């Protein structure tokens, strides 16, 4: 087991290095560079050179990359060229805010998707399957910002049941009930956004499992369908779901960009959008690297978890 885990970690490290080079290179190739974002046409050449020196932009590209990576490895992600605030400090606040929003939504979506996917797969071609599959198709086709606007209009403006912007009411920052009320609408939007693909995946996996020989043997022995579904099929359906959960790790950071922007939630999404609008390249690079790295790490974690629950995978890897 440890040999397999060590091997996967060693495979992930070069990928992380490549990802960092790509993120840095894309920003270097951008037509509007960081110097343009920090200077104005009225500045003298000397002032521009001082600004370049302050942020290390007068160095060759490879030296800029070296200092950038060195800072990241030491926990210092650089500084915003717009606000001049520490990116590490901003991320330490923004990331937890996003996790508070995304994690419950994804957990709810996962539980509901397993239930609905099992029902749809077990009732293939029946009314329940058609309804669930139809709603999943509808959910995939509908943009999350549209769902957000509909919920805001109905529950925010018409019924005035829930707040529609921010994470707290001013002056009531320490109240859990206030936080919960602000969470309701964006959580619903994210849950409905995450569910369609998950439902279809579980449905497809359930249909595949129901055609396996072990199910036919159980049916031949007269085992009840509900018992077969929950005692045997469910366990095998959940195994590949582990891979999805691991690969969904980046969602905890960047999975709610649109929803956070619509609801004004102070998370990574709004932070990223504002950085793009202000050409704040250090922040853009930091979030690109963070989200890309989480893809690699999520894939690594899913492989490790899968090898734990299914030792055959470990044997194939070795």
Image: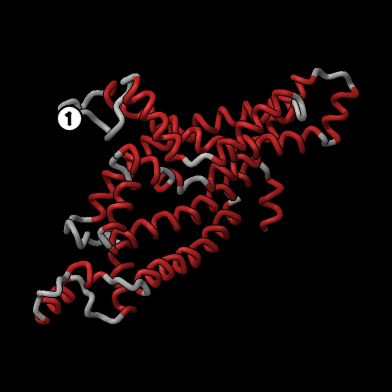
98 vs 222: above or below: below
Quadrant of the rendering where the C terminus is positioned: bottom right
Tell me which corner region of the image, top left, top right, bottom left or bottom right, holds residue 129.
top right
Residue name at image x 37 percent, y 74 percent? 29
Tell me which corner region of the image, top left, top right, bottom left or bottom right, holds residue 262.
top left
Query: In this figure, which colouring scheme has been used for the structure?
Result: secondary structure
Residue closest to the eye, 183 or 292: 183
Residue closest to the eye, 204 or 65: 204
Residue name at image x 39 percent, y 44 percent? 258
| 140 displayed left or right of 147 | right
Tell me which corner region of the image, top left, top right, bottom left or bottom right, holds residue 215.
top right
| 298 displayed left or right of 202 | left
**Badge 1: how crowded within 10 Å, few (<14), some, or many (20+)?**
few
Total marks in image: 1
Residue 265 in the image: state x and y as whole percent.
Answer: 30, 39
Residue closest to the eye, 154 or 291: 154
Residue 6 in the image: state x and y as whole percent.
Answer: 54, 57
Residue 222 in the image: state x and y as whole percent.
Answer: 87, 18
Secondary element at tag 1: loop
141 vs 286: above or below: above
Kindly identify which residue carries mark 1: 170
Residue 182 in the image: state x and y as whole percent.
Answer: 31, 28
| 82 displayed left or right of 18 | left
73 vs 141: above or below: below
Residue closest to the eye, 2 or 256: 256
Residue name at image x 23 percent, y 50 percent? 89
């Amino acid at each position: 087991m440890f040999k397999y885990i060590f091997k996967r970690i060693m495979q992930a490290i070069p990928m992380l290095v490549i990802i960092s080079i790509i993120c840095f290179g894309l920003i270097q190739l951008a037509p509007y560079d960081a110097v343009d974002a920090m200077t104005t046409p009225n500045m003298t050449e000397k002032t521009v050179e001082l600004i370049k020196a302050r942020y290390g932009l007068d160095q060759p590209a490879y030296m800029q990359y070296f200092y950038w990576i060195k800072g990241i490895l030491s926990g210092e992600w650089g500084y915003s060229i717009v606000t001049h605030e520490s990116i590490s400090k901003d991320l330490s606040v923004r990331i937890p805010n996003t996790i508070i929003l995304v994690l419950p939504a994804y957990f709810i979506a996962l539980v509901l998707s397993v239930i609905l996917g099992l029902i749809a797969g077990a009732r293939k071609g029946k009314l329940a399957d058609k309804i669930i599959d139809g709603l999943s198709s509808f959910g995939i086709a509908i943009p999350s910002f549209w769902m957000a606007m509909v919920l805001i209009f109905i529950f925010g403006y018409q019924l005035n049941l829930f707040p529609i912007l921010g994470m707290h009411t001013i002056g009531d920052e320490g109240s859990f009930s206030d936080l919960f009320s602000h969470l309701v609408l964006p959580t619903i939007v994210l849950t409905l956004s995450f569910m369609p693909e998950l439902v279809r995946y579980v449905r497809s996996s359930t249909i595949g499992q129901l055609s396996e020989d072990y199910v036919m043997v159980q049916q031949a022995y007269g085992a009840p369908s509900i018992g077969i579904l929950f005692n045997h099929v469910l366990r095998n359906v959940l195994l590949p779901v582990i891979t999805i959960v691991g690969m969904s790790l980046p969602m905890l950071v960047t999975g709610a960009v649109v929803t956070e922007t619509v609801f004004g939630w102070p998370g990574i999404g709004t932070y990223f959008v504002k950085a793009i609008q202000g050409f704040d390249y250090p922040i853009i690079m930091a979030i690109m690297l963070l989200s890309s790295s989480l893809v690699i790490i999520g894939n690594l974690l899913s492989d490790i978890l899968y090898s734990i629950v299914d030792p055959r995978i470990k044997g194939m890897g070795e």
